[in-house]
């Protein structure tokens, strides 16, 4: 990923927090010599050395996955930024946050490990529900999925949040984003503005 210096994020705690908050991403590898992507939720392993998820056994991506280098793309909030929102001259652009994780892929089919993964994913994504789903399914259904682990060999993090603009321009962009309801991105920009002061 191309990352100009003023958009680079190197703080490991900040990157880990981003990964946990934005863990739905794309796994990109090769299938029969061509690029192939699957959209899926991931969990960060307890030791923070890999991302873990699962694919349907019918998904052809799992067949060639073991030992292959993969790329996981995780995106945060994003939106169009109009040059009319600046005091100083500018051009149309897009603000966003993204993490790319590159690493070696492994698959697993051990039922106990798959069950633990499904229950861990459910616990994370059901946590905001008033009546969270309690795992209750036929264990044979685990035979329809394949676990995927991608090691965190390389992590790139980019927050393109108008850091190359003046404080006044950045505040005006935040205000315009708030006005249009893009609060997550506005809040990310506001947080970045406070961190850099």
Image (cartoon, rainbow, N blue to C red):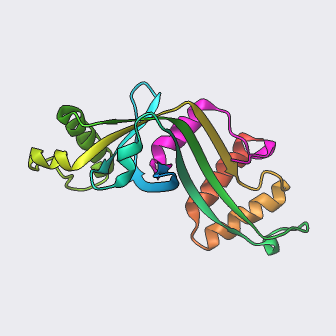
- The verdict on residue 90 being magenta is no
Identify whether 19 is placed above or below 166.
above
Relative depth, front residue between 110 and 53: 110
Residue drawn where x is 75% and y is 60% of the image: 171
Residue drawn where x is 73% and y is 48% of the image: 2
Relative depth, front residue between 51 and 30: 30
Give the quarter of the image for residue 78.
bottom right
- Left or right of 176, for residue 84: right
- Left or right of 64, for residue 184: right
Q: Residue furthest right?
A: 89
Q: Position of residue 57 (x, y in %)?
A: 27, 51
Identify whether 135 is placed above or below 168.
above
Q: Position of residue 155 (x, y in %)?
A: 60, 36
How many badges with numbers are in the image? 0
Residue drawn where x is 51% and y is 51% of the image: 33
Q: Which residues are magenta?
A: 1-29
- The verdict on residue 7 being magenta is yes
Q: Position of residue 167 (x, y in %)?
A: 82, 54
- Left or right of 89, for residue 1: left
């Amino acid at each position: 990923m191309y990352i100009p210096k003023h958009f680079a994020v190197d703080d490991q705690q900040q990157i880990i927090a981003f990964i946990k908050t934005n863990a739905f991403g794309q796994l990109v590898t090769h299938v029969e010599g061509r690029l192939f992507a699957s959209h899926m939720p991931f969990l960060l392993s307890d030791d923070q050395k890999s991302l873990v998820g699962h694919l349907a056994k019918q998904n052809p991506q799992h067949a060639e996955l073991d030992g292959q280098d993969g790329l996981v793309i995780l995106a945060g909030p994003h939106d169009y930024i109009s040059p009319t929102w600046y005091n100083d001259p500018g051009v149309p652009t897009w603000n966003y946050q993204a993490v790319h994780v590159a690493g070696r892929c492994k698959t697993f089919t051990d039922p106990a490990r798959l069950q633990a993964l499904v229950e861990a994913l459910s616990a994370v994504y059901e946590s905001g529900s008033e009546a969270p789903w309690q795992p209750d399914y036929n264990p044979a259904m685990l035979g329809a999925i394949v676990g995927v682990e991608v090691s965190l060999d390389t992590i790139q993090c980019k927050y393109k949040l108008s850091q190359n603009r003046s404080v006044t321009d950045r505040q005006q962009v935040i205000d315009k984003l708030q006005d249009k309801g893009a609060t997550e991105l506005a809040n990310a920009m506001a947080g970045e503005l406070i961190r850099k002061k």
